[in-house]
Amino acid sequence: MAVEAPWLLLPAWSEIRGPAAARKALTHWLGQCDRLESGKVGRQEQWLRVFDVLPRRLAMAPLTRHLDADDAAHRAWLRCDPVHLRADGPQARLLAFGESLRLSEPEAEALMAPLRPILGDHGVLLSAPKPDRWYGSIAVEAVVPLMSSPDQALGEDVLPHLPEGAQAARWRQLWNECQVVLHQHPVNAKRAKAGLPTINSLWFWGAGVLPDSVRSVHSHLLTRDELGLALARLAKLAALKGDEAQWPPGAVIDLQHLRNAQDLADAVLPAVRLQATRHPAGITLDFADGQRLRWRHAHRWRFWRRPVGGFPPATDTA
């Protein structure tokens, strides 16, 4: 049975910045909401509140492979994403990955050509349905040490994010071999000359197989998040375009990227107030730090309630 209340996925309170006036409007509004039982912290945990996934582990590589190429079944997958590292004294920092690389399909194919035999010797069959998302097909029984996602490591020294232990040794060796090949590649010489970030390393992460089951009580999803899109495809949720005058019952609207209090106050707050007039069950607000609230139209009269706390200081410059 589908849920009645539309859901909004929002960033953690600690991530919301902006001017004092906008923050005041938000905190007063949120103070008028009903508090729901808190959930676990984290972006993946938000998705696990939307989707019932079995087993309860989200392996990014097979999920996004299913989204990109629809051939992820019956094999295990590993993300082997191209990245740009920069030496910073004794450290190497991850500075670019994904769309920020502006990597073309011909460049990706040229870079992968000398890497395929090296990776193949380690049981990794390299392919790239998208230029900035590379995948290794691996045996289901393969043991791949866990490694941070690139967005977690962005801007940081990569060493703490690399796998450790006996099983990690061969992967570190493979990582180093790939770096040597990429450092010498003519594509990188052209990119450096053009002022583009060079592709000087791979990032091995997200290994696993597709989940056995993905279901949801929700009906529609609006998101730009690759994990959310992949789960929605498996659960057969309808896509929400974003320009609908009325949110369907059970719709999930992902606004996690909106971290400016002014944007939330100007666009999201009025939209929720309007939609709540059309949904008696109200609108559920799910924050990445586990805070969960519900706004109903009748809550507008709760003007005596105290504002919520926990927001960062205002960023007014005046």
Image (tube, rainbow, N blue to C red):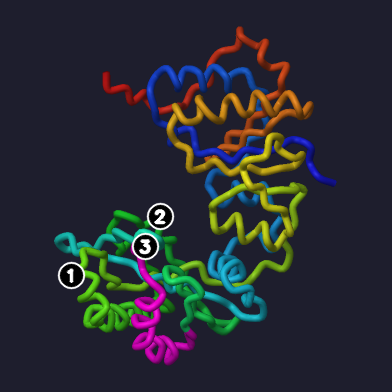
Q: How many marks?
A: 3
* Label 1 Cα crowd, 10 Å radius (few <14 / some 14-19 / many 20+): few
Question: In percent of the image, x 74 and y 40: which residue is there?
Answer: 248
- For the residue labelled by badge 1, is the local secondary structure a helix, a strand or a loop? helix
Label 2 amino acid?
Gln
Q: Residue 152 bears which disc, if any? A: 2
- Alpha carbon separation for disc pair 1 and 3: 19 Å
Q: In front of the other: label 1 or label 3?
A: 1
Q: Residue furthest right?
A: 1
Q: Nearer the viewer, residue 213 or 164?
A: 213
Q: In front of the other: label 2 or label 3?
A: 3
Q: Earlier in the sequence, mark 2 or mark 3?
A: 3
Mark 1 lies on residue: 193
- Alpha carbon separation for disc pair 2 and 1: 29 Å
Across and down, in percent, residue 19 comes to 38, 23
Q: Nearer the viewer, residue 101 or 10?
A: 101
Question: In percent of the image, x 57 and y 26: which residue is there?
Answer: 269
- For the residue labelled by badge 2, is the local secondary structure a helix, a strand or a loop? helix
- For the residue labelled by badge 3, is the local secondary structure a helix, a strand or a loop? strand
Highlighted magenta segment, given as a residue range: 101-125
Q: Earlier in the sequence, mark 2 or mark 1?
A: 2
Compared with residue 316, is residue 74 higher up or lower down, i.e. above or below?
Answer: below
